[in-house]
Image: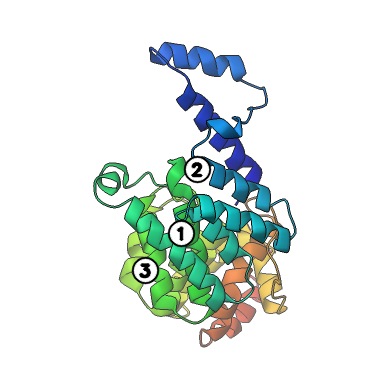
Amino acid sequence: MNKDHEKMMADLHRMLESQDFKSEKDMKKFLDGILGKPIPSMPAEALTPEERAQDLVFEAYDLEFPEGKEKIKEALDLDPDCIEAYEYLGSAESSPEIAMVFFEKGISIGEKKFEGKHLKENIGHFWGLRETRPYMRCLQFQSECLYAIGKTEECIRILEKMIKLNPNDNQGIRGRLMLYLIEAGQYEKYVKYDTQFKGEKSAFSLFNSALYAYKTGGICASSNKKLREATKFNKFVLPKLLNREFPTGLPDHYGLGDENEAIIYLFYAYPIWYSTKGAIEWLKNQKNSSSFPG
């Protein structure tokens, strides 16, 4: 969770709800008046128990875990259905099996909160709604835990659900989804999402495309061409992959085509390339060919 951003959005939402706007013009005038200014927090006595619980979770992120955990207990006393609290507890665990218990609880609460009419009216916009973001984050973290313990099929189902709830994929999980579909041999679904996100250029999309072409067509003009295109877009992926530079962590930021993007891609893709029969030999041979970029 980007705690500072989420806290700011919560404060802004609460401030807007406290106003009695007569028209959109009034709301725009109000927003123009606070543009560029710090968003003040509402006094605790003006908040609902659910809102106070959310603020306690925000506070927990600024503390060491033992103190933060006490804040989470307070939050759950106020609101037993505080999804953010279970997101915090899951994120604090190093064991995916234990973390999953907390994420599953957050997901279960979200399923109950957002089913029925809410789901029907807002499907497709679940990242655009502030109240559904903690649920979406729990889904993402749960998918990572499932993959880490070898439950790829279950991971795929969650990622597909996330795309259905938010086709714009603001969380950026489509690259992982398509990578895992290739690994699982679910090629029809890979083509479906490749079509949905057609035209995207990133290390994920281009190197996934090369891997798909190799797995479905072997060494051929198409797979060789796609590999060249991918390597031309991000020159850092292939050397790191062939030199067995397995990333141990994820960078805080990246740019398209830069080294950090390569690290993020390989963090997820490295074992899949190495488990694909003949793929590494193909990469080595292509890299050493005279027609290869660089």
Inter-mark Cα distance, 2 to 1: 36 Å
- Image coordinates for residue 171, horizontal then vertical, percent: 50, 52
Q: Amino acid at mark 1?
A: Arg
Tell which residue pokes out farthest to the right in this image: 64
Q: Amino acid at mark 2?
A: Pro
Q: Earlier in the sequence, mark 3 or mark 2?
A: 2
Inter-mark Cα distance, 1 to 3: 12 Å
52 vs 220, left or right, is: right
Residue 65 shows up from this direction: yes
Q: Earlier in the sequence, mark 1 or mark 3?
A: 3
Q: Amino acid at mark 3?
A: Arg
Of badges 3 and 2, nearer the viewer stands: 2
Residue nearest the observer in this picture, 260 or 218: 260
Q: Secondary structure at mark 3?
A: helix
**Residue at screen point 68% across, 53% down:** 61
118 vs 37, left or right, is: left
Q: Residues within 10 Å of mark 3 (few under 14, many from 20)?
A: few
The number of numbered discs placed on residues in the rendered structure image is: 3
- Which part of the image, by quadrant, shows the C terminus? bottom right
Q: Secondary structure at mark 1?
A: helix
The residue that disc 3 covers is 157
Residue nearest the observer in this picture, 77 or 5: 77
Q: Kindly indicate whether the residue at mark 2 contacts the one at mark 3 (C-beta within 8 angstroms).
A: no
Of badges 2 and 1, nearer the viewer stands: 2
**Residue at screen point 51% across, 49% down:** 78
The numbered disc on residue 49 is: 2
Q: Kindly indicate whether the residue at mark 1 contacts the one at mark 2 (C-beta within 8 angstroms).
A: no
The residue that disc 1 covers is 174
Inter-mark Cα distance, 3 to 2: 34 Å
